[in-house]
Amino acid sequence: VPIRGWLADLGLLGEAITVGRRFGEHSLVELARLAVFVEHAVYTPHSLALVPGGLRFLFRNPPLRLGAFDAVRLTLDGSPVPSGSAWVDVGGAGKPRRLSEVTRDAPLELLPGVATEFRADLAAKLAPGSEHVVRLDLHSVAIPPAVWVQFRDRLEGPAR
Amino acid sequence: MTGAPEPPSLDPILWKAERAHPANVALLSGLKSFGVFGGGGDFRWVRETRGARFDWGGAYGQGIRLSGPWTLRFEVDSRSHGMEETLVSLTARRHRVDSIHHTEVGDLLQSALIPPTFTGVARRLEFHSVVDRPLLLSLRSEVEPFLAPLLVEGLRPSEYRFDSLDGFPRLRALGSSLVLASAPRPDAVQIDGIAWSGESASAPRPRVSLEHTLTIPPNGVAATTLLLWGGVDRTLAAETPLLRGELSNPEGWARAAEALWQTWVSGTPELRLPEAPELEAAYSLARSALRALYYEPDPGFRGLRAGVPWYADVWGRDLAWMLPAVLWMNDADWAEGALRTMFRFQAPERLPMLGAELGELPMQVSPGPIFLYGTSDTTLYYPDRVRRLIAHTGGFPGLLQDFAKPLALIDRWIDAKTDSSSGLLRNGGEIEGMRAAVGGAGSVSYGIDAPDTTIWDSTDRRDHAVDLQVLAYEAENALAEISEQSGNPAGATKARARASGLRGHLQTRYRWAGEQYLYDSLRIDGSPVEKLRPNALLAVTAELLSPELGAALIQRAARPDLTTPWGVRTLSNLDPTYDPRAYHDGQVWPIATAWAARATFAARVPELGVEYLRTLARMFLAEGGLANECYRGDAPEPWNSCCLLGFSVGPFLTTLFEGLWGITPDLAHRRVRVDPAFPAGWRSARIDGLRFAEGILALGYEDGRLTVLWSGELPITLRHAGEDRTLPPYRAQVLSRTHT
C-alpha cells in the first residue's frame, strides 16, 4: 500500500507540474485548494470513535451529491455492516434511523452544511487506536448510479 | 431603481403577481454573477433537488455560491413585517425584479438587480409614507455566507472567518469572500445576534445582519441600498475601490443593467410567425434565456453557464449545444471567445488525475481556473462548432491558424478513442481512470459508480453509443471541411474516409429491424443494446440514413412510449428498466424534444416538427422565461430539474432557424441555402436581421414565395428549392415557389 501511495503521489506531482506549467500557477493553487476542501468537507477528521457496542463517525456534508437517498450501505474494513445494525442521525435531531428503514418512500435527506452522525453496532470488539477503512455507498432517488465515500482513520477512545 | 417612468423596453415583463408565490422564481443574471430571487419577495427559493427540498435563494458569482438565502424584515409604526406577508405586487424582468410591500402607513418598494460594476446582487428599498406624521422605519437584512464552489455539489465550508472591509462585514472561506454593504451605512451590524464592530473572528455558520433605522418625513420617502458582493479574493480587490462611490448610484445601476439587455436583444434577429404566435413568443423568451446564461467571470474566460441555479459553470458539452444558438443570435464574437476558452483548457497531454486524455476538452471549467475532464462526447462536438463559426462569418483573420493545433489534437483524441477492430468510437471507463490515478492519495476518497459518461451519464450505454458515432461522423466531416479550407487535402481525405466508414456502420450495424429504429449502442462484441432512446434521432438530423429509414425513425419516436404531450422521454416506457423519475432512464428532457423536432424537419415532416416545437414553446410560456432541465416521465412536473438549462433553450432556438426555416450558411464560400419546412397552410413568415459575415439577410415568406434582402458589401449566392441566385447588396428578390 505505501508503494502504491508513493507512486500515486509521484504521478500526481508530475501531473501537477504539467498543470502549473501549462495552465498557470493560479490553476494549480485552485485545484489544490479544491482537492483539500473536498477531502475535508465530508468526513469530520478524527470523528471515528468507539461507542458502547460499536462505533460512530460524523459527516459535515453529503458526499458529492445532495438530496434524497433510498439506500445506504455501510462497510467496515471491507465487510458489510447489516443495515439493521447501523443508524443515521441527521442534523443532530436526536432521532436516529436504522439504515434498513431508509427506503424510496422514506429516503434519507442529506443537504449541504447539515451534519450527520452514523453509528454501527458491531459484534467484534475494536481497539482504540486501531486503523479502519469505512465506506458508505448511497443511492440517490434521482440520479443513479451510487455515490460512495471511503475514509481511513484511527479509532478514537469512547465517544459520548 | 424605482419611480422612474417606464421606457419602451426590449426586456419585457416575464411574469407578474399580486401576492406572494414562493414557489415562483426570478433569475437576475449578469456576466459575472447571478441572483436567485423567490416569488415571496426575498432572495429565498426552496426547490426540490435530487428528491429533497433545498433553498437556492441568494447570490452567486465567479463560480461560487456566495450566499445562502438573503432575507429582509422591516418595522414601521411599531409593527413588524416580513416581505412575503406584505407583498402585493411583484414584476420580474431579465434585468431586475420589482416588488411592492403594503402596510397601513405606506408601501415599501423594492428593486433587485445585478449591479454592473460588482460581482453580486443589490436591492434598493424605498418606503413611501402615506400618513401626515413622521415615521420611524427599521430595516433588518440577514444573510448566511455559503462560499462554496459550484463545481462540487453539496459541499459548504464548515467554518468562516470574518473581518471588516471598509467598515462592512466581510466573510471569507476557500479563497473567496462575501461582503454585505449598504448606503447609508448601517446603524448596527450583528453576527450571530451579537453586536459587531469590526473585529476579526471565525464561526461555523455565521448569520450576518445589517440594521438601518430611518426617519420618514410626513408623506415622504426614505431609502437605502443594500449590496451583497463577493467572489474570488484575488479578483475582488479590483472592485473594492468602487464600494463608496457606486453604492450611492442605484439609478445608474438600473439604467446600465437595462441598457445591457437592450443592446444585446436589439442586435439579434426578429422572427415573425403569424401562423404560430406561440412559437414567436417562445423565441423571444428563449432568446433572452440564452442571454441570461452568458458568463464571463474573468477577463479572457468567456462562455455560457450550463444552467441555473446548479450547473452554473461552463460545461463543455452544454456549451457545445448552446453555441449554434449563440451564432444564430448574431453573436459570433461570443461564440469565438467561448471556443477560445475551451481550447485554452484542452489537455496538452494525458492527465489521469483530472480524467484527461491527450487532446480532450474539459467536461467542466470554472474560474480559478479549475477544470475536469472525463467524458466520451464533449471533445467530439468542437470541430463542428468551429466549422459553424466559419460558416456564419466566413472566418476571421487568423482563425484557422489559431484553431489548427486544437483541432489536430482533437483528431488525435478521436484516433485514440476509436476501437481499432470495429472502427467505432468507444465510451466507458472515463471515470475509472481518474479514480485509479488518485486512489492512493489522501485519506478520504469519493466516487460515482458511473461506468461511462455520454450525454446521459447516469446510465450505462457502453460500449459504442449511437450518438457518439453520429458526433464522430459530424466531427470528421467538419475536420475534412476545415482541412480543405486550410489547404490540407491529405487531412481532408483521411477525415472523409473515416466519416464514410462511420456512415456505413450506422446504416448497417445499428439498424434495429424489429423496431424500425436504431440500436442505442453496441457492445464490444458487436451485440446490440436494444433500448429505445431519442439519441438515435441525431442520425436523421445528420442525414446519415436513407429517407425511408429516417421517416421510419421519426414515426417510431412519435409513438406514445417515447413521446409524451410534454416532451420526449430519455427511454421508452416499455423498456423494463424505465423509471419515470430516473434522470436518464425515463424522464422527459426538452433537449430530447428538440432533437425530435430537428430530425422531423430534416425528414420533411413539418407538421410534426412544429408540434414538437409547440411542446417546447408551451414550456417557455408557462415557466416565466425559464426552461426546466427535465420533467417526470409520467407527468408534466419538473423533477430533479434546475429551473433553467442551456440544453433546453439552445437547441430550440437552433431548430427554429435550421429546421423550420431550413437555413444553412456557408459564408466561407459566400453561400446560404434556404429551404423552409413550413406546414401546409402556413401563409406567411418573416425573419429580419440575420447576420452573416459582413451583411444582414432578411427573409419573407408569403403564399409560397420567398423574398430575400441582402445588405452585405459583397454579393452572396442563395440556394433555394434547388436553384442558385446571386444576391447583390440592397436589392430585394422574389424567389421561386417554396417546396415544403
Image (cartoon, rainbow, N blue to C red):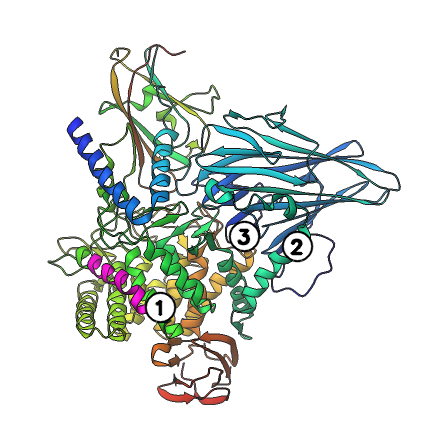
**According to the image, label 3 marks what residue?**
B29
Q: Nearer the viewer, mark 3 or mark 2?
A: 2
Q: Chain of mark 1?
A: B
Secondary structure beneath dot 1 equals helix
Left or right: B68 as drawn, with respect to B412: right
Tell me where the magenta segment starts and ends, as one range.
Answer: B398-414
- Counting residues from the start of the chain, the first of labels 3 and 2 encountered is 3
Left or right: B451 as drawn, with respect to B178: left
Amino acid at pointer 3: Ser
The answer to whether the residues at label 3 and label 2 have Cβ atoms under 8 Å apart is: no
Label 2 to label 1, Cα distance in Å?
A: 47 Å
Q: Chain of mark 3?
A: B
Q: Nearer the viewer, residue A143 or A7?
A: A7
Amino acid at pointer 1: Ala
Secondary structure beneath dot 2 equals helix
Left or right: B260 as drawn, with respect to A107: right
Q: Which residue lies at the image location 50% right of the left edge and 88% below the top edge?
A: B732
Left or right: B503 as drawn, with respect to B565: left
Q: Residues within 10 Å of mark 1 (few under 14, many from 20)?
A: many
The answer to whether the residues at label 2 and label 1 have Cβ atoms under 8 Å apart is: no
Indicate which disc residue B599 carries.
Answer: 1
**According to the image, label 2 marks what residue?**
B252
Label 3 to label 2, Cα distance in Å?
A: 17 Å
Q: Nearer the viewer, mark 2 or mark 1?
A: 2
Q: Nearer the viewer, residue B405 or B371?
A: B405
The x, y position of residue A144, in whole percent, is 33, 42
- Counting residues from the start of the chain, the first of labels 2 and 1 encountered is 2
Q: Residue furthest right?
A: B132
| Marks 2 and 1 on same chain | yes
| Marks 3 and 2 on same chain | yes
| Magenta span includes B114 | no
The x, y position of residue B444, in whole percent, is 30, 29
